[in-house]
Amino acid sequence: MSEIICRRIDEQTPSEDGEVGERVLVDRVWPEGVRRQGAPLDEWLREVAPSVELQRWYGHHPQRFGEFRRRCLTELGDQRHKYAAARLRDLAQHRSLTLLTSTQDMDHSHTAVLAEWLTEPGSRWPI
């Protein structure tokens, strides 16, 4: 398994952070203030992000994070998320991976859940 890093998309460019590997945006919506042309990423896997319904329920309330995490992991195995989850898993198995997001609170975000999910033993993967 390669290294998994979480970063805000507006923090550093690949040359500034010195990371090699794939840089993947994992937000459902394109980040405000980031131009698509020349954006510092290799791929956008919007379908791996939590559903709109789950994001609305969570509302970035840290006290709900445990349940949010559980629901995110469940969603990764459903039909809407399966292809993107498999693609992300494939990328993580072959190269270092930087998960990009516009979320302010990285510790209580879907990006943290994805990073944990990607580094867990294969038996935990819902797909």
Image (cartoon, grey):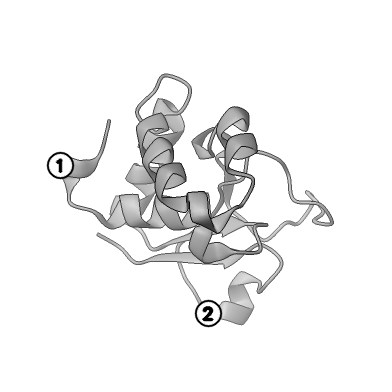
Name the amino acid, label 1. Answer: Ser
Q: Which secondary structure, mark 2?
A: loop
- When the figure is inspected, residue 3 is found, relative to residue 110, above or below; the finding is below
Front residue (pair 117, 41): 117
Residue 123 quadrant: top left
For the residue pair 68 and 92, the one nearer the viewer reads as 68
Question: Which badge, 1 or 2, is on the more N-terminal residue?
Answer: 2
Residue identifier under label 1:
123
Question: Residue 72 appears in which quarter of the rendering?
Answer: top left
Q: Position of residue 1 (x, y in %)?
A: 24, 59
Point 48% across, 22% down: residue: 80
Q: CA distance from mark 1 to mark 2?
A: 32 Å
Q: Position of residue 109 (x, y in %)?
A: 53, 55
- Residue named by callout 2: 18
| Image location (x, y in percent) of residue 33 | 84, 56
Determine the residue located farthest toward the top in the rendered image: 79
**Quadrant (top left/top right/bottom left/bottom right) for the C terminus:** top left
